[in-house]
Image (cartoon, helix red, strand yellow):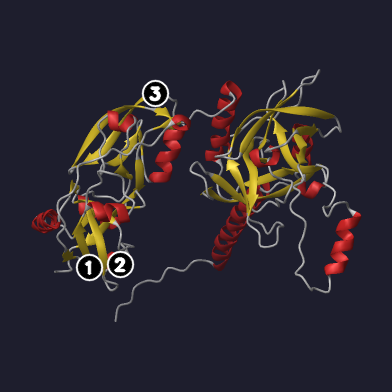
Amino acid sequence: MNSQPVSLVPAARVWRSAWVLIVGMALVMAQAIAAQAQDMPKSFADLAERISPSVVNITTSTTVASRSGPAPTVPEGSPFEDFFRDFMDRNGEGMPEPRRPRRSQALGSGFVISEDGFVVTNNHVIEGADEITVEFFSGEELDAEVVGTDPSTDIALLKVESEDPLPAVPFGDSDASRVGDWVIAMGNPLGQGFSVSAGIVSARGRALSGSYDDFIQTDAAINRGNSGGPLFNMDGEVIGVNTAILSPNGGSIGIGFAMASNVVTNVVDQLQEFGETRRGWLGVRIQDVSDDIAESIGLEEARGALVTDVPEGPAAEAGMESGDVILSFDGTEVEDTRELVRQVGETQVGKTVRVTVFRDGETETLRVTLGRREEAQDAIPASAPADDPIEMETLGVTVSGLTDELREQLALPEGSEGLVVTDVAEDSEAYEKDLRAGDLITEAGQEKVTSPAELEERIADARDAGRKSILLLVRRNNEPRFVALPLDEQE
C-alpha cells in the first residue's frame, strides 16, 4: 500500500507566521483608530475663538399699539353687577382709561459677511421692528438698517456702519457637506448671550413649508434666540442659517434646521444688489410623476415634473402644453417638482433657457425666456362651452357634460369645459385616488374631453394601445392635477 509523502512545517515557522499576521492586523486596526481620532476634534475651542467675533446678537424693538374695545358687560342681576359698575365709574364715564402704546423686544442672532458691515439673519427676527441693534462679541453695539428681506426663505440682510473694518466669515458649499460631518452652531439662545453648541449633520435636503426650502438638519443644540445664527463646518465656513427647531416643548431635542448656504448666498446677492429678490418664473403649474402616471403616458422612468396647466406667461409663449413632462431645465436633469422650482427660482430673470419635455412619446426641446416670479400674474385661458349633458358611468366614476347650471353651482369660470364628476364608487380606485363629486375632468389620455362619448373614446384608445391606465386631468377649485386610473375596471 503506497502512501503520499506528508510535508511537515516546523512549529516555529507556524508561530512566526501567525505572529506576523497578528501584528499586521493590529497595525491596521491602530491606523483605523488613529484616522477616526483625527476626524473627531479634540476641542472646538480654537475654531470657536476664531469665528466668534463675526457672530452677533440681534435685539429688535417694536411699538405695539394698544387696542381699546368696548367696556365689559355683566348680565343684569348678576352678583358682580354692582362691583363692575363701581369699577367703571372710578375710571370715568363708564369707560376704562386708554392704555398707552407699549414697546416689545425680541432677540435673535446673525453673522457678519463683509468688512463694510453687511449682516445676515432671519426675516422673522427683524420683521416689523422699529429699531434693530446689533451687539458684537466685543460688547460693541451698532444700530442696523434693513437692506432687504425674503420671507420665502426667511432670510434678511442688514447693514451697520462702523469706522473700523468688521470681522467677517465666508460662506461654504452646503452641497459638499455630508451626513455625519461635524458642525457647530453659534448664537444667542434664550437671550443668554454668545453660546456655542456642536453636533453633526443629521440629514440634508429637508423641506418644511416653503417652495425654496433646502434645510440642513442637525443635532447641534438650537434654541429660541439662535434664529438667524450661523451653522459652521470645521473650516469655519457658514453652511447654513439656523432657522427652526422641531420640539414638543419649545426647547432643543436635537432636531434643528438651518437653511442651506447655497440657497442663502443667492438670496443675499440679490438683496445686496437690488434690495429685493428677483426669481426666475417659468409660468406652469406642475406635479410629481408617479409610477402609474409614467406608465399611462409611456414614460420609462417616473421622474421629472408633469405640467398640469400653462397660464399666460413664458412657458405658454414658448409652446409648452399641459401634459408635458419637463425632463431637464437649462442643461440640468429634473428629478421632481421641488427640484425644478429651485432651479427656476435661482435662474436669472430674462435668461433664455432650454427646457426638454416629454410629449406624445417623444422628447422636444423648447427655448423659454424666463419672467420674474415676484411680478407674475396667473391667467387661466378661457375655453369654449361644453356640449349638452349626458351621464355615463366608467372606471368607478359617474360623469356628466357641463351645463351653465353646473358651471354656476361649481363656481367655475365662464367658458370652462369638461366633464363633471357627479358620483364616485367608494370601492373604486378613483375614490382611493381622491376623485370626488364636483371634480371637473378636462382631459383624458392628454386630449380634451367635453362629452362622455369623448371620454369613452379616449378609454378605448388607451386599451387598444395596451395601456394599463389612462391619465386624467382633473380640476378642483380651479386647481389642476393629473390622476392615472387603471383600465382593469370594466364597465
Quadrant of the frame with the C terminus: bottom left
Between residues 102 and 491, which one lies in front from this camera angle? 102
> Badge 2 is on which residue?
431
Say if mark 1 contacts mark 2, CB within 8 Å: yes
Q: Judging from the image, what secondary structure is the residue with disc 3 in? A: loop
Q: Tell whether 356 sits left or right of 455.
A: right
Between residues 132 and 118, which one lies in front from this camera angle? 132
Q: Residue furthest right?
A: 90
**Marking on residue 345:** none
Disc 1/disc 2 C-alpha distance (Å)? 8 Å
Sooner in the amino-acid sequence: mark 1 or mark 2:
1
Q: Residue furthest top?
A: 163
Residue at the spot 30% in from the left edge and 38% down from the top edge: 310
* Rendered location of residue 358, percent (x, y): 24, 41
Q: Tell whether 355 sits left or right of 74.
A: left
Sooner in the amino-acid sequence: mark 3 or mark 1:
3
> Badge 3 is on which residue?
351
Q: Judging from the image, what secondary structure is the residue with disc 1 in? A: loop
Q: Amino acid at mark 1?
A: Gly
Q: Is 308 drawn above or below residue 471 in the view shown? A: above
Q: Is 174 drawn above or below residue 32 in the view shown? A: above
Query: Image quadrant of residue 273?
Result: top right
Query: Image quadrant of residue 103?
Result: top right
* Rendered location of residue 475, percent (x, y): 31, 52
**Marking on residue 396:** 1
Between residues 409 and 43, which one lies in front from this camera angle? 409
Sooner in the amino-acid sequence: mark 2 or mark 3:
3
Q: Amino acid at mark 2?
A: Tyr
- Label 1 crowd (10 A; few <14 / some 14-19 / many >=20): many
Q: Is residue 290 visible?
A: no
Q: Residue furthest bottom?
A: 1
